[in-house]
Image (cartoon, rainbow, N blue to C red):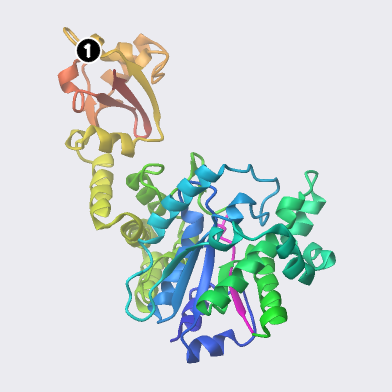
Amino acid sequence: MNVYDEFHWRGMVYDVTDGLSDLLAKESVTAYIGFDPTASSLHVGNLLTLMGLARLQRFGHSPIAIVGGGTGMIGDPSGKSLERVLLSTEQIQENVASVQRQLERFLDFGAATNAARLVNNAEWLAHIDVLSFLRDTGKHFTVSYILQKESVSRRLESEEGISFTEFSYVILQAYDFLQLLDRYGCVLQMGGSDQWGNITAGIDLIRKLRAKKAHGLVWPLMKTAAGTKFGKTETGTIWLDPVRTAPFKFYQFWLNTDDNDVLTLLKYFTFLERSAIDELEAVTRQTPEKREAQRVLAREVTSLVHGADQVVRAEHASSVLFGEDIATLSADQVLAVFGDVSSSTVPVASFEGGGVPLVDLLADPQVKLAGSKSEARRLVQSGGVYVNNRRVSDPQLKLTRDQAIEGRLFVLRKGQKLNHVVRLA
């Protein structure tokens, strides 16, 4: 199977130029994808794009990852209803460095024959003068041609409209494709389907200025089976940076995948062969309650992004969260596990000496696990309260600092799901 066939069976071909499948079957090509440095980290929405380049390299082709230090100064209007907030040059440079480090986990930059390249398009865009650009490149694009691009036409229909700054983005990206052809022999650009207009603009420019045929391949934009945007949760974006999204939370995101989405995501985001995915499909159909496909998905993607050691930690934290004594975790691990639950801070001095009555904590307005001390007392007596995952039944119990996890926090739980973290400070 060549890489085009691989993309096709994984559902990653939404649109493609004529002749690309034959080219990929016969020759080793150089291809690129651009990454927008408008944030200090990529997110799971970028992951399909990363996997596209990684798959390409595994089949013997040469990938180029462009980090848009130049185009990032402008902002891509594709898929955006509002004008982007322009970042400073310094912020973009910091973001570029962060994104480059993440790309290195997916691509082999030391391969003997098809090493990946990291390229910053500021290398050429930051030094071109506006008159030369308008004369030599801009004249090949009519206004009507740009207006036909979906990313532009949609913005024109909105109340905000589109500035000349973002209107020019399609020309800048086309110029990127031309530069990569000249510098590295790059003949293929890939990306999400919202990039098709930008990609075909580059193909047209190469045809006009170099009389050569270039190609494009795009995959579908990610949505869940329920129709929601992939990668967005109630608590926000799932980032690849472990500081912005803890590895445990990242693991849980994949573990919570709906049965209707899990097989698609296994094809998109893992390197598992077809036979392995077919087996997981059969297991999911026969015993969906085991969630074996979700476990494999979470394990594979977390290992790819954060490393196998973080998978071990995440799986241990999951077993603790749903069964064992939470005190076996470090305070930092507990905070990662319960990063999305409500929390409050209580002076550490309160827990010294005689300690703090548990019923007082449960009824505290900041904790709100009970409406009153009497209700808290009834909850404890009925066995509905847990401290650090251990059921308690003594309404006279007082919590002291030495009972806290690393002397820093308690996890209080009401029933099976309602948690609250008390931090000692």
Nearest the viewer among 398 and 402 is: 402
Chief SS of the magenta region: loop
Choose top left, top right, bottom left or bottom right for residue 325. top left
Choose top left, top right, bottom left or bottom right for residue 353. top left
Based on the picture, tell me whether residue 219 belongs to the magenta stretch.
yes
* Residue for point 38% across, 72% down: 277
4 over 322 or under it: above or below: below
Based on the picture, tell me whether residue 96 belongs to the magenta stretch.
no
The location of residue 287, given as percent across then percent down, is 36, 63
Circle 1: element type: helix
383 over 308 or under it: above or below: above
Nearest the viewer among 324 and 6 is: 6
* Residue for point 23% across, 41% down: 320
Q: Which range is magenta? A: 213-228
* Residue for point 40% across, 44% down: 245
* Quarter of the picture holding the N terminus: bottom left
Question: What amino acid is found at the position of numbered circle 1 in the picture?
Answer: Phe
The location of residue 69, given as percent across then percent down, is 54, 54
Q: Where is mark 1, residue-wise?
A: 351
Residue 267 shows in this picture: no
* Residue for point 35% across, 10% down: 373
Residue 62 shows in this picture: yes
